[in-house]
Amino acid sequence: MKLLVDSFDPAVPIGSLKPHPQNPNRGDVDAIADSIDELGYFGAVLAQIEHDDGSESRTIIAGEHRWRAAQDVGAETIPVLWHRCTDNEAKKVVLGDNRFTRLGVVDDRLVHRLLTELVDDNESLAGTGYDDDDFEDLTVAVEDAMRAASNEWEEEDEPGTEASPHHRTADTVVKVGEVRFIIDRDDYETWYESIRQAVGFNSRDINNEVRRRLGLPVPGAPVDVEEEPVEEGVDE
């Protein structure tokens, strides 16, 4: 494996670096600056040492917006990982650093769980990139998605129990087709999360996975047919 880091300097003068002129990404510098104010600066920028012609580069190829945010909060130095690479390799790093993030998928349910834990601990959401309005919007979105996934898989709190908006602790009635059973809410959350990890957030995939785990028929699934062996050489 080729390592990108040739050397590390924890305190490079911030003004001695420059952004890559062809970086296509436009990040939210203000949000990053808020995070630095709340949590401090973490990580380091990746910078090219020199160009193909041997001239000094000092060009940031990953972490430009952290560098800009550090400038905005008044930092004089910044940690830098120095990388000796060709100009074309530098372009590939710039493209990949932005592209790979966008290829990923955000699990809104897990984000909501993390935010809920912070709120329950009376922590502000400063430094997370989310604010209270984002949290409320995400709460609605997650609850809507769970309702949408319950066309076949229905869940409701047992009568006579009370539950908070974000952490319902009551037992839950789960109904899949004609099958109905009661499950502890915490166990239900764990079970549901394992299914989400296995198949994603598509309601049909969730319903089919639940059916598979319960040993129920899955709509559209191939049916195994056992053929009886035919004895050869036997006349009727």
Image: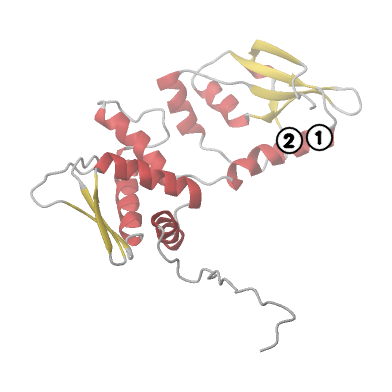
Kindly give the residue lying farthest to the left in the view shown: 160
> Label 2 vs label 1: CA separation?
6 Å
Q: Which residue is mark 1?
A: 89
- Direction from residue 124 to residue 89 in the image, left or right: right
* SS of the residue under disc 2: helix
* Quarter of the C terminus within the rendering: bottom right
Q: Residue 174's spot in the image, x, y percent?
A: 27, 55
* Above or below: residue 90 compared with residue 217: above
Please name the amino acid that badge 2 sits on.
Answer: Val
- Direction from residue 185 to residue 76 in the image, left or right: right
Please name the amino acid that badge 1 sits on.
Answer: Glu
Kindly give the residue lying farthest to the front in the view shown: 235
Q: Which residue is mark 2?
A: 93
- Direction from residue 20 to residue 158 in the image, left or right: left
Q: Residue 1's spot in the image, x, y percent?
A: 79, 27
Q: Which residue does the image show at 70% across and 13% down from the upper left?
A: 8
Please give the count of numbered marks on the rendered protein: 2
In this rendering, does residue 133 appear at all?
Answer: no
Q: Which residue does the image show at 83% across and 27% down from the upper left?
A: 85
Q: Nearer the viewer, residue 106 or 82?
A: 106
Q: Which residue does the image show at 57% across and 45% down from the upper left?
A: 104
Q: Are marks 2 and 1 in contact (CB under 8 Å)?
A: yes
In this rendering, does residue 4 appear at all?
Answer: yes
Q: Nearer the viewer, residue 115 or 226?
A: 226
* Above or below: residue 57 compared with residue 230: above
